[in-house]
Amino acid sequence: MKLSGAEIVVQALIDEGVEYVFGYPGGAVLHIYDAIFKEEKVKHILVRHEQGATHAADGYARATGKCGVCLVTSGPGATNAVTGIATAYMDSIPMVILSGQVPTPVIGSDAFQEVDTVGITRPCVKHNFLVKDVHALGEVIHRAFYIATTGRPGPVLVDIPKDITDPNIKVSYEHPGEMRMRSYSPTTKGHIGQIKKAVAAMLGAKRPVIYTGGGVILGDASHLLTELVRKTGFPITSTLMGLGAYPMTDRRFIGMLGMHGTYEANMAMHETDCLIAIGARFDDRVTGKIEHFCPHAKIIHMDVDPSSISKNVRVDVPIVGPVSSVLADMLSLIGEHAPDPGRDTLREWWSQIEEWRSMDCLCYDRTSDKIKPQLAVETLYRVTKGDLYLTSDVGQHQMFAAQFYPFDKPRRWINSGGLGTMGFGLPAAIGVQLAFPDAQVACISGEASILMCIQEMATCKQYGLPIKVVLLNNGYMGMVRQWQELFYESRYSHSYVDALPDFVKLAESFGHVGMRVEKPGELEAAMSEAFGMKDRFVFLDVVVDPTENVYPMIEAGKGHHEMHLSPERELA
Amino acid sequence: MRHIIAVLLENEAGALSRVAGLFSARGYNIESLTVAPTDDPSLSRMTLVTTGNEDIVEQIKKQLNKLIDTVKLFDLTEGPHIERELMMIKVRAERADREELKRLADIFRAKIIDVTDTSYVIEITGPSTKLDAFLDAVPEGLIVEVVRTGPSGISRGEKGLTL
């Protein structure tokens, strides 16, 4: 069929099965917006800032596993999108970003709203393209989807100059069918010899630990992981990004690991003799000081991205491949030979772990007359009965949520782990709620983070999204304040937010419901009321104890065995 | 250790900047980099010289391979290979120095390719170490200008880095 460039963009999105495009119009994309206006199959969601578009597409992708799509204009449209693109890149989220560009003849002339988008985004995309010929446009867009969604997923940007989408120039377009590229062919299967080696090491281990990351969720391997844990009886810990891949309410789950992980998880990491890393990348927030990392362990690492292996920590048994296929092969190898999960050596290991667990490292003051942030998260869990899509911003509230809201399913905990982007939570919730209109979706945030993308409350109003914002309001950038208290002798340099808006009135001015809670006794009723309003966006401003810190904590540059519990219960 | 890595890249706009950007973003050393199209105009061949411990070089190769534009990659230093670099050097050549420089060029199998009353331009090809040795051998104070291409490399034997 003969289509204009603008029509090709829209048709290619339809062919890719795209439901929603998150975007913001502008000069360089006007032809595309005109084509969108005439086509109803692709629904466009108008955000209020391009950063919001990228986070919403990202939230949609994390919750559904499908590719998120956004559309922004040239210049400031593209630069505003950069933070969201980098966020998706760090967490390997499949996303396609279509950006407008000034017309080809004026590229390089510092034209109005011109910026070198391909150059600016190069370090934070999996790949990007500048389309210079309308005949290549369709193929490039399909290629972008192929690259974004296969192998280790990631954002791919397609920069489209305005003349390429000229409605008067029609060229032939057809769906290219199955994609093949000579320069890109991700691994689809793990090396069976390596998997055998790994199984032998695992079954011979006395103190094994399974350490999983976001890769298990991205690779849709939760059921296989669960089977592996059931079969072996091994303890399992997870990174911030991997929470929910294995049911967190199960006893085999020993909590998150790393800087704010549980005592039992970090001690198990320190003492293990066989570490089984699955779709995790040994981030510095997880490993602590590399020299002290798992000093006694043989390390097995399965990951779809070869460059993740032995990047930070040298690995003994590397397995390159999608975690789903590697785990399936592993399970069939273990087959009937699985050792008794209750065998003596493992029983000893478990009793050691239970001893660590009995430290109750997450305990906090439940009798306080102020609302403790931990209490707020626990109440959220009770009120939502554990059935929630929870997006998060970045800071203390993010850590409290990770520690106190046990997710039993993958894709329910949606947060910016790698880049740590404040402002992520609210727009991400937009993408999640659109994907699952009937599900309970909440955004947990702080009064500092929420203000970074507060304008998206208007988007929620426009599309009638009944998201619940649970704001843990302590008046400080809590995590900054915590570090200043601990490492800068309580010099709270610019971490106090002196002029906060009245969030109740603010929510109301956007056409939403605002509520404020200040006493622990009122918390549960208020939350129940908020979540009871099924068709309203509710902003719940929870005033929490401003002095509460996140514990346990491993200081940057320390080992897993050097963690602090709360100051009252410092370890010997 | 010094590694010479040969890469076949899609001959696309921006491919070179992806490689250069990768090295600066990840803080890898890059000693030299040469690139030109091959007999297949859709492919560029790049020779990249880098140094680092084995872990870092391994990461460099993985990261290069990860670039979508990378078609194939080979670490020439893993096997027998030939390395050649071209250097042109402009020297002051007056009176007695003229004979001395001519002799030196002969010893190194270099060629004098431009002559004036007071200067020579000498062309020399070889592994980088030979070029270094030539520079050392030129009497002090005579060098006006040096231009080097950076090494290109190819493996010995019948097997080639092709598609």
Image: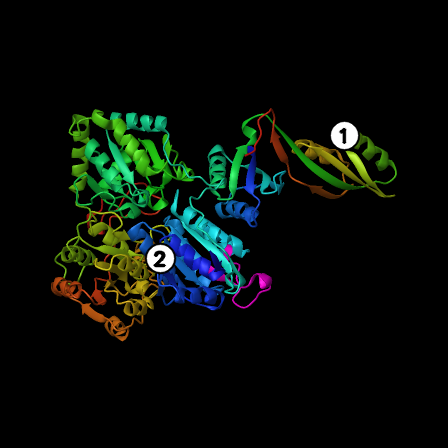
Pointer 2 local density, CA inside 10 Å: few below 14, some 14–19, many at least 20: many
Q: Chain of mark 2?
A: A
Q: Nearer the viewer, mark 1 or mark 2?
A: 2
Magenta stretch? A99-118
Name the quadrant containing residue A549.
bottom left
Query: Is residue A126 something that shows in the picture?
Result: no
Q: At which x and y percent is residue A56?
A: 34, 59
The residue singled out by tag 1 in the image is B109
What separation in Å lies between label 1 and label 2 (alpha carbons)? 63 Å
Question: Does the rendering let one see residue A395?
Answer: yes
Compare residues A69 and A196 and report the one nearer the observer: A69
Q: Position of residue B106 (x, y in %)?
A: 80, 30
Is B64 on the left or on the right of A464, as rendered? right
- The subunit letter for the residue under badge 1 reads B
Tell me, yes or no, whether the highlighted magenta stretch contains residue B97: no
The residue under the point 76% across, 37% down is B123
Q: Are marks 1 and 2 on the same chain?
A: no
Residue A217, horizontal then vertical, whole percent: 29, 45
Q: Which residue is mark 2?
A: A57
Q: Residues within 10 Å of mark 1 (few under 14, many from 20)?
A: few
